[in-house]
Image: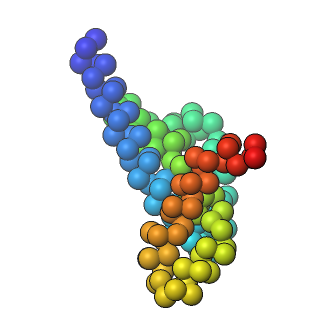
C-alpha cells in the first residue's frame, strides 16, 4: 500500500499546486477586468455547483481511470474558490489608495504590486480585528 499512498500524495500535491496557480491567475485577471469577471462568474458558479461525479464521468471516459482524470477533476473542483477569493480581495482595495498611487505616477503594474496586492492581503488577515474596534 506504500506505493499507492505515495502516488496519491504526489497527485494531490501537484493537483493542489496547479489549482492554486490557475485560481490565482484567473482571480488576478477577474479582479482587474470587469468584462472578464462578468464572463468568469457563471463558469465558476457552474464549476462549484455541479457535482464532482458529473464532470468526472466524461474525464474517465476520455482518459480512463487513473492519474490524468483525477488530476483534472481535482483542479476543476479546487480552482474556483481560489479565483473568487483573489478577485474579491483585488476588487475590495480602497479606491482612495489606488487613486493616490495613480496620482503619484505609478503605472498599472506598480499599482498592482504596491497597492492592490498589499491591500487585498491586509484586508483578508486583519478583517476580524477591524470589526471589533
Residue 80 visible: no
Write down the quadrant of residue 94 in the picture: bottom right
User: What residue is at 57 percent from the left and 61 percent from the top?
Assistant: 119
- Please state if 1 lies on the left or on the right of 27 as rendered: left
User: What residue is at 66 percent from the left and 75 percent from the top?
Assistant: 96
User: What residue is at 57 percent from the left and 59 percent from the top?
Assistant: 120
In this view, which residue lies farthest toward the left?
Answer: 3
Q: Residue 23's spot in the image, x, y percent?
A: 49, 53
Q: Residue 79's spot in the image, x, y percent?
A: 51, 48
Write down the quadrant of residue 68 in the picture: top left
Residue in the foreground of this view, choosing between 91 and 127? 127
Residue in the foreground of this view, choosing between 23 and 1? 23
Residue in the foreground of this view, choosing between 119 and 10? 119
User: What residue is at 51 percent from the left and 37 percent from the top?
Assistant: 56
Write down the quadrant of residue 52 in the picture: top right
Q: Residue 76's spot in the image, x, y percent?
A: 50, 45
- Please state if 58 lies on the left or on the right of 132 as rendered: left
- Please state if 11 lies on the left or on the right of 94 as rendered: left
Q: In this view, does 92 lie above or below 49?
A: below
In this view, which residue lies farthest toward the right?
Answer: 132
Amino acid at each position: 500500500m506504500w506505493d499507492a499512498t505515495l502516488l496519491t500524495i504526489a497527485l494531490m500535491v501537484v493537483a493542489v499546486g496547479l489549482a492554486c496557480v490557475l485560481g490565482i491567475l484567473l482571480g488576478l485577471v477577474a479582479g482587474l477586468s470587469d468584462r472578464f469577471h462578468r464572463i468568469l462568474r457563471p463558469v465558476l458558479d457552474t464549476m462549484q455547483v455541479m457535482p464532482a461525479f458529473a464532470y468526472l464521468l466524461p474525464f474517465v471516459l476520455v482518459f480512463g481511470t487513473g492519474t490524468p482524470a483525477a488530476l483534472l477533476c481535482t483542479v476543476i473542483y479546487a480552482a474556483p474558490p481560489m479565483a473568487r477569493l483573489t478577485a474579491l480581495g483585488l476588487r475590495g482595495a480602497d479606491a482612495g489608495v489606488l487613486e493616490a498611487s495613480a496620482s503619484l505616477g505609478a503605472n498599472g503594474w506598480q499599482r498592482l504590486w504596491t497597492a492592490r496586492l498589499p491591500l487585498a492581503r491586509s484586508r483578508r488577515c486583519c478583517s476580524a480585528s477591524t470589526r471589533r474596534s
